[in-house]
Amino acid sequence: MLGIEPYFDEPFYVGYNVGGFELGLNPALEHGPITYWGVPDADAAVAELIAAGAQPGDPVTEVGEGIRVATVLDAAGSTVGVIENPHFETPDAPSSPGPGR
């Protein structure tokens, strides 16, 4: 669908570089894949999501090579994943608030 090959392809995680942003999928789950948002600090991202009303899901866990993932459940019960990947350079955050911020 993206027209590009993943930069990381393992049974537990498939990672894509999409316009400088990380798109990650965990294809090995029984209930379907989880999409992960790349973040610079997984612990901080999970804390921020929970403070905003999300419920804890899977705790921050290292899955190899310094890559750390976690999930939370949003208000609708959907799983939201975050990934801290030291091998992927995340773009700097915008300096001014944008839509939805």
Image (cartoon, rainbow, N blue to C red):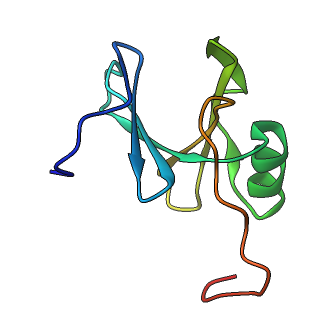
* Residue at 79% across, 80% down: 95
Task: In the rendered view, tell whether residue 52 sits above or below residue 89.
Answer: below
Q: What number of labels is visible?
A: 0
* Residue at 59% across, 37% down: 88
Residue 90 on image: x %, y %: 64, 50
Residue 4 on image: x %, y %: 22, 44
Residue 67 on image: x %, y %: 64, 23
- Closer-to-camera residue (82/47): 82
Q: Quadrant of residue 12?
A: top left
* Residue at 50% across, 61% down: 76
* Residue at 63% across, 12% down: 65
Task: In the rendered view, tell whether residue 8 sits above or below residue 92.
Answer: above
**Quadrant of the snapshot with the C terminus:** bottom right
Tell me: 31 left or right of 22: left
- Closer-to-camera residue (80/85): 85
Residue 10 on image: x %, y %: 36, 14
Task: In the rendered view, tell whether residue 81 sits above or below residue 66.
Answer: below
Tell me: 18 left or right of 67: left
Q: Quadrant of residue 54?
A: bottom right
